[in-house]
Amino acid sequence: MKTHSFLIYIFVSVLIFGQNDIQLSHQAFVRQYFNPAATGQNLNTVFNTIYRVQWTGINGAPETWVGNFQHYFNAAHLALGVNVIDDKLGLEHHQFIKLAYAYRIFWNENNYLSFGLSAGALFKKIDMDRFSLDDNTEQVQIPENAWKPDFDAGLEFRLKKWMVGLSVTHLGNTFPKSTLFLLPMHYYGYIRFNQSWTPDYELSLSYSMNTTTFITLHELNGSLLFKQLLFGGLSYRFNEAIVTMLGIQLFKQLKIGYSFDMSAGRLPTYVSHYSHEIFLQYLFYKDATGQPSPRFFD
């Protein structure tokens, strides 16, 4: 691999412009990846997984797998979970594993305030076997492997139809920009409104903001559920992508979704404008009524 390959690697890395935390089109459905206060989804035992391929056809473009398992302890009003992330970008391969804790204070069945913390580690590897320069170019000294402890915190407030959340990832990392082995703090905020105007239709509208000191991303999402069976949605990630989403509730405990991203700016014309994402959610546990929680958009 010659010098131009190194430049391509740097170019692709720069294109991520702040995608230090993973970027997901199903973020409105799996907010526990970014806010530990959301752990305890559906007040059940839940498994979520997402596989994402970004900028298809580009060698070294981002490829991400995430998995989450969580359980809500009804008597104690608390939840425990584990998040695993495997993310590849060019010569980089990084993995997160984190344990999450959330505690909820209820005013009634539909109103609560949740506090959350998560702790774990980031493991990162640079594939130096694929990295070389021209013979007359001085070699760059880069460590091949490293790991760092990592911490997150968040709050989530829920009313019957409204939800508001705030969280911070990579607590304590106060440096202004990311490096190969260190990530700055990321701040997340979101608000969501759900409305069912007939037994057959439920509408979910949400706004989210993800920011660091050097980039801020805004996203709007609207999703419609039909007969508790089929759902579709549309998102606009400001100056970045338009996202279409489709999904189905195969049975009461299994939900599958797919999203297709099309670039809406920032990327050069010679970079693929398309990304794909597959989402799966399975509920293992049934609540006291004998049925999974009716909160579909969780």
Image (cartoon, grey):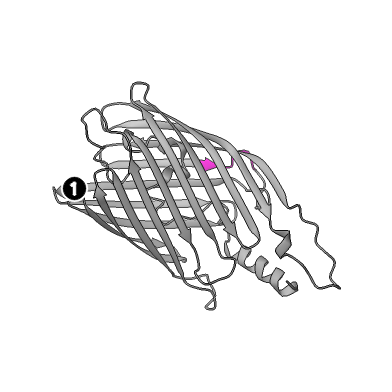
Q: Main secondary structure of the magenta part?
A: loop
Around disc 1, counting alpha carbons within 10 Å, would you say few (fewer than 14), some (14 to 19), or many (20 or more)? few
The one nearer the camera, 34 or 147, is 147
From this viewpoint, is residue 202 visible? Answer: yes
In-image side of 273 versus 253 (left or right) = right
**Which residue bears the numbered disc 1?**
196
Figure quadrant of the C terminus: top left
Furthest residue toward bottom: 270
Query: At 36% from the left edge and 59% from the top edge, which residue is drawn?
Result: 258
Residue 245 on the magenta span: no
Residue 172 on the magenta span: yes
List x then y, in percent, for residue 121.
Answer: 61, 40
In-image side of 132 versus 176 (left or right) = right
Query: At 76% from the left edge and 67% from the top edge, which residue is drawn?
Result: 132
- Is label 1 in a helix, a strand or a loop? strand
> Can you tell which quarter of the image residue 73 is in?
top left
List x then y, in percent, for residue 5.
Answer: 69, 71
- At label 1, which amino acid type do we have? Ser
Furthest residue toward top: 75
List x then y, in percent, for residue 183.
Answer: 63, 48
Query: At 67% from the left edge and 52% from the top edge, which residue is drawn?
Result: 125
Q: Is residue 211 above or below residue 58?
A: above
Query: At 76% from the left edge and 52% from the top edge, which residue is drawn?
Result: 143
- Please provide the residue range marked out in magenta: 168-173
